[in-house]
Image (cartoon, grey):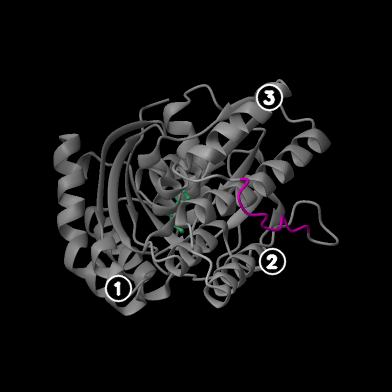
Amino acid sequence: REDAVILAIESSCDETAAAVVRNGREVLSNIISSQIELHTLYGGVVPEIASRKHIERINQVIEEALAEAGMALEDMDAIAVTYGPGLVGALLVGVAEAKAIAYAAGKPLIGVHHIEGHISANYIENKELKPPFLCLVVSGGHTHLVKVKDFGVYEILGRTRDDAAGEAFDKVARAIGLGYPGGPKIEKAAREGNPQAIAFPRAKVADNPYDFSFSGVKSAVLNYINGCHMKGIPIVEADIAAAFQKAVTDVLIEHAMTAAAEFQMEKFAIAGGVASNGTLRSGMEAACRERGIQFYHPSPVFCTDNAAMIGAAAYYEYLAGKFAGWDLNAVPNLKL
Ligand code: KG4
Ligand code: ZN
């Protein structure tokens, strides 16, 4: 089999990204233009601003990705793009760009599911990893416990009923005045805090042991803060951050291990922005080690939104001959 080099594009939220990936595992370039500083002004992602910034930056980002890989468009075997889920206006910029490039250069087009991209980020640095394995996908928009049965074949075991894990981090960070994006700021503040200082709830969801709910713990934090204000008790941000982070990661790890036991899986991976959280990572690592499960996680740069993970996922679509037509469209609520 010949090498396959794929140019991948990702624009589903607030990162404009392009990457060149060889055979799904070798990242030749990985360019990410983050809009975080812009959205920080508003305390969260503003969809209209995101779309406009993607339009301004996408050509430059793609040119840089090709240049860094030392390649030209002609050298690509396919053009891949995230077509959902995500913000529709943001997705449309990447999809339109990918279609234009693929059409003009006479290359096949591959549509990639954003979550499939996050999961596939694990293939980049773990060359031997292949399905079947379980994956916990935790990001700003998603909290999914997924059984990866084969390349491109997934079964969702559980998901959040309300807030995504990253969303809860972002909301709590805002409530204690740490700003956006909340995950890394909570993690930093938590290092100085005591996770046992405050008892926040660990929610169970009635009819599915793999589903999650994070709106309860978020409300508990808000109520705790209001209570402190009313009683004139000083608010210790570090303790709130540490106790909240522990409550969320405890639930994630517990559900993950319940699934690992039930499905007798020897491999467990994590993915998505929250997967760069040190408490989650070390907790998962310890829980997996205890049970003789091999644990996988991407480096932080491949946890948050990037295009290399889209190139990794696209490779298996390429091998399966699953190409998109010129009618490929953005699907904001695309199912896995
Ligand atoms: O995967 P991602 O970049 O974008 C989405 O697809 O949503 O994830 C972003 C989310 C944000 O909610 C951010 O607060 C969270 O990941 N995050 C973290 C950490 N780094 C990013 N959450 C907890 N701890 C972190 N270190
Ligand atoms: Zn993402």
Asked whether residue 130 is in view, the answer is: no
Report which quarter residue 16 is drawn in. bottom left
Q: Which mark is residue 51?
A: 1
Q: Which residues are magenta?
A: 196-204
Asked if residue 63 lies left or right of residue 142, the reply is: left
Quadrant where the N terminus sits is top left
Image point (27%, 76%), residue name = 49
Tag 3 residue: 293
Image point (52%, 21%), residue name = 128
Cα gap from disc 3 to disc 1, whole angstroms: 41 Å
Cα gap from disc 1 to disc 2, whole angstroms: 28 Å
Image point (79%, 61%), residue name = 205
Main SS, magenta residues: loop
Tell which circle, 3 or 1, labels the residue nearer the N-terminal end: 1
Residue 75 position within the rendered picture, expressed as x and y whole percent measured from the top left: 22, 39
Asked if residue 75 lies left or right of residue 109, the reply is: left
Asked whether residue 135 is in view, the answer is: yes
Disc 1 or disc 2, which is closer to the eye? 2
